[in-house]
């Protein structure tokens, strides 16, 4: 009779252990199968000049960030001051991928919040976001001189992320090659 209760108890304890372990993990660090692989190519219309296009190949030979954002994204407001700060230092080009957004709303948002992007492209249907494995906004990708994704950050970046993760990686990638 006791054995009948031991199996469900063991299953419950195992599941509770997995849940407890999962709660200790950082949700912004989700392994991406794209890290170490070439960034998916795109050629999209620029937000501020839809008759012009911009793509991954335009950044070849540079270390750069691709920041996925939207005007409707609350977390994007949190990280935006850090992107503006990074852009002000001129240390690394940041390209904006405006994700599933309305063009006029995005333009207005950048005017109000400041525009840290060297260029912003529009991904109105989310196709490019899917190719990059975007879970939601914001997400930031660090891409090297050869167009290879070296790091993916899910969620808003903050001063700690910039200083302790991104800047050391950017410095290392900038020296390489």
Image (spheres, grey):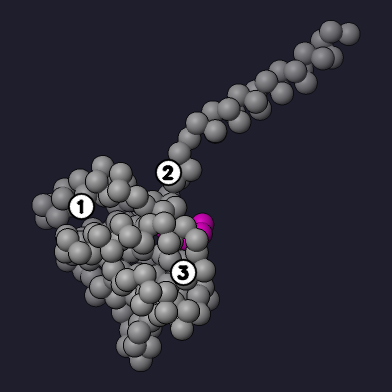
Instruction: Say which quadrant the N terminus sits in.
Output: top right
In this view, the mark in front (1 or 3): 3
Front residue of 17 and 32 = 17
Lower position in the chain sequence, tag 3 or tag 2 = 2
Instruction: Kindly report the secondary structure that dominates the magenta region of the rendered protein.
Output: loop
Q: Which residues are magenta?
A: 135-139
In the rendered image, residue 158, in percent from the top left (x then y), is placed at 34, 50
Asked if the stretch drawn in magenta spans residue 10, the answer is no
Image quarter for residue 18?
Answer: top right
Q: How many marks?
A: 3
Mark 3 closeness class: few <14, some 14–19, many ≥20 residues within 10 Å: many
Which residue does the numbered mark 3 point to in the structure image? 70
Closer to the N terminus: mark 2 or mark 1?
2
Residue 157 horizontal/vertical position (percent): 36, 52
> Looking at this rendering, what residue extends furthest in the top direction?
2
The structure residue drawn at horizontal position 23% and vertical position 64%, both measured from the top left corner, is 87
């Amino acid at each position: 009779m006791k054995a009948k209760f031991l199996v469900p108890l063991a299953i419950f304890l195992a599941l509770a252990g997995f849940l407890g372990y999962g709660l200790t993990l950082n949700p912004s660090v989700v392994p991406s199968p794209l890290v170490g692989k070439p960034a998916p190519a795109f050629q999209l219309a620029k937000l501020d000049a839809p008759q012009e296009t911009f793509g991954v190949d335009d950044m070849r030979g540079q270390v750069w960030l691709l920041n996925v954002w939207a005007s409707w994204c609350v977390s994007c407001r949190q990280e935006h001051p850090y992107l503006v700060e990074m852009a002000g230092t001129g240390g690394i080009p940041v390209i904006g991928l405006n994700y599933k957004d309305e063009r006029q709303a995005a333009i207005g948002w950048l005017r109000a919040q400041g525009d840290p992007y060297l260029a912003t492209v529009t991904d109105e249907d989310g196709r490019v976001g899917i190719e990059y494995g975007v879970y939601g906004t914001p997400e930031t990708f660090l891409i090297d001189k050869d167009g290879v994704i070296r790091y993916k950050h899910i969620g808003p970046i903050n001063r700690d992320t910039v200083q302790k993760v991104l800047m050391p990686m950017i410095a290392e990638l900038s020296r390489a090659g």
